[in-house]
Amino acid sequence: MYRNDGFRELNRRESLRRLAEATVGRIVHTRDALPAVLPVNFLVEEDGAVLLRTSASSELVRAVDGTVVAFEADEVDPAAHSGWSVVVTGLASAVTDPDEHERLVRTGPRSWVPWPVEVFVRIEPELVTGRELVGGRTLYGVNLPS
C-alpha cells in the first residue's frame, strides 16, 4: 500500500480474523493459461489455512491441486464508503489423508450444493495481506461531504 492512499494496512492476525468472519470468498487460479475467479464458501482453520469443499469431479480441484492460488474475501459498505479486503496467497492441495478427510466432513465447511463424493482443498497461507478503508474519508484523509 502507498502512504496516504486512504487505506489502513491490517496485520496478519487481524486479516485472518476478518477473513474468518466472511461467508463467501473468491479463489483466483489459472485456467487454460488465463486468470479465473470463482466465488466459494469456505472456512479458516486456526493456523490461517483456507478450506474449501467441493465435488471430487470438480474442474476447480483439477485446476488448483498443487498450484499457487490467491484467495480473497471482503466486506464493503458502499453507502458509508468503507470496507475491508483480505488476500491469502499460497499452495492449494486436495486433502488426501482419509482420517483428516473424515475429520473435515464433521468440522469443515459445508457445501452449498452437496455431492455424493466431495473433496476438501486447503490453501496454505504463505502470504496474508489485508486493508481497510474507513468510511467518509478521501484518499487524502479529507472528510467527504454528506
Image: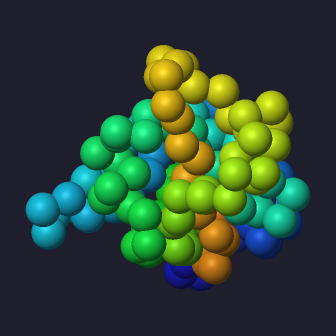
Say which residue appears at 53% left-offset and 58% top-offset.
94
Image check: 31 left or right of 112? left
What residue occupies the far top of the structure in this picture? 113
Asked if one can make out residue 64 in the rendered structure from this viewpoint, the answer is: yes
106 w.r.t. 85: above or below: above
The quarter in which the N terminus is drawn is bottom right
The quarter in which the C terminus is drawn is top right
In x, y percent, where is residue 125? 66, 71
Say which residue appears at 64% left-offset and 70% top-offset.
124
Q: Determine the image quadrant of residue 35.
A: bottom left
In x, y percent, where is residue 62? 33, 56
101 w.r.t. 81: above or below: below
In x, y percent, where is residue 145? 56, 36
In x, y percent, where is residue 48? 77, 62
Q: Determine the image quadrant of residue 87.
A: bottom right
Image check: 66 left or right of 1? left
